[in-house]
Image (tube, rainbow, N blue to C red):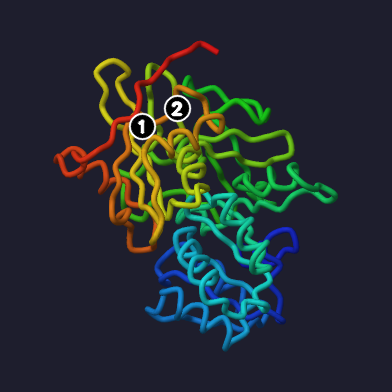
Amino acid sequence: MHAIAVCLVDALAVSREDRVLPVVPMFHANAWGLPYAAMLVGAGLVLPDQFLQPEALTRLIESERVTLAGAVPTIWLDVLRYADEHKPDLSSLSRVVCGGSAVPRSLMEAFEERHGVHIIQAWGMTETSPLASVARPPAGTEGEEHWAYRSTAGRIMPLVEARVVAGDGSIAPWDGETTGEIEVRGPWIAAGYYEDPAGEHKFHDGWLRTGDVAAIDPDGYIRITDRAKDVIKSGGEWISSVELEVELIAHPAVAEAAVIAMPHERWSERPLACVVLADGQSATAKELREHLSGRVAKWWLPDEFAFIDEVPKTSVGKFDKKSLRRRLKEGELEDRVKVGEAERTTA
C-alpha cells in the first residue's frame, strides 16, 4: 500500500522511466519506501554502497543518469557546496525527495536556481514506513505563495489520517495556527512495537504519537514547528529550534546550525545556537543575531552562540542534538559568545 501511494503523481510520481537513488543506508526509513516503489513499477535502482560523499554521489548521478534521489538535508547541503564549486552534470536529476528534518528554503531555492534540481520536502518517520505527507503546492500557486507551500512538511497523503492534539488532550482544529502533537494512523502506520510493551505510550487510542509539534491548515498541509523533545520553553512560551536553524542556515557564511535549549536562571530555558561556518567564510555572533532579527520574534533571538567545527550527526546524517545537549551539560561548550539578553514582550 505504501509503495503504491509513493508512485502517485501527487506523491513522488515514480515510474518505469525513473532511475532511483536512495542516498541513505538501507536500514533507514528513507530507504524503505523508494526501493519497494522502484521495484513495483520497474524503475532502475541505483545503490551508492557506503560512498555518500558529495563527489561520489554526483559522479554516480552523472554516470547512471539518476532521475530521482532521496536523502536528509545535511547530505544535500554538502552536495550543493560541491556542485557550486565543481559544476557536475545534474541535468538528469528531475526531483529530489528530502526529509528527516526541516528542509531549509534557501537549500531548495539554491538547487533550483543554480542547478535546475527540484527538491520536494516530505515528512514521515520510521513508524510511518516512512511517507506520510508530501509538499506539492496547489496548482496555480506562484511566487511567495508557491514557496510557502514548498516550505511546509507537506499535504497529508491519501489513506493517512492525521490530527493535532493540544496540550490539554483536546483535538485542535485544522486552522493552520493551533499547534499540538501530531498523531497519525493508516494502513502503513505502525500500530505498536513488536514484543515491546514499554513502547505503548507512543500510541493513543489507535493513533501513533509522532512527537512532532505542528499545525495543520484547512487543506491538510502540515507545518511542523519542532520536535517535542527539542522545543525550547522560555518564560512559559515555546521557541522553535527548527525555525531558528532554517533561518541561520540561510546566512551565506553558515554551513550548519543546530539550536538547543540552554538552562537560564530567569526564563528557565534560552536558545543556544551551535554554528559551523563555511570554509573561507566568517561571521560574528552579533552579525548572526542581526541576521535573525526581523525573521523571528525578538524574544526568540539567541543570547549566546557556540562556534563549533561540526554538528554531530546520527548514523543517517541527522543532527544529533542529544550529543550537543550532553556536551553542554559536561561543559564542552563553555567557549560561547554572549551577544544579548532576552527581552520579553506580550505582543
Q: 209 or 83, which lies in front?
A: 83
Count of numbered labels shown in the rendering: 2
- Element assignment for label 2: helix
Labels 1 and 2 touching (C-beta < 8 A): yes
**Residue drawn at the location 45% of the way across and 43% of the way down:** 245
Q: Is residue 81 visible?
A: yes
Q: Is residue 279 left or right of residue 47?
A: left
Type of the residue with mark 2: Trp
Q: In the rendered image of this protein, does residue 118 appear above or below residue 248?
A: below
Residue nearer the viewer, 82 or 42: 82
Instruction: Judge from the rendering whether residue 284 lies leftward or rightward of residue 332; answer left or right.
Output: right
Taking the view exactly as shown, the residue that stands out farthest to the right is 140
Q: Residues within 10 Å of mark 2 (few under 14, many from 20)?
A: many
Q: Is residue 209 visible in the rendered structure shown here? A: no
Instruction: Please provide percent x and percent y for residue 32.
Output: 50, 68
Q: Position of residue 72 (x, y in %)?
A: 48, 60
Q: Of label 1 and label 2, which has the lower sequence position?
A: 1
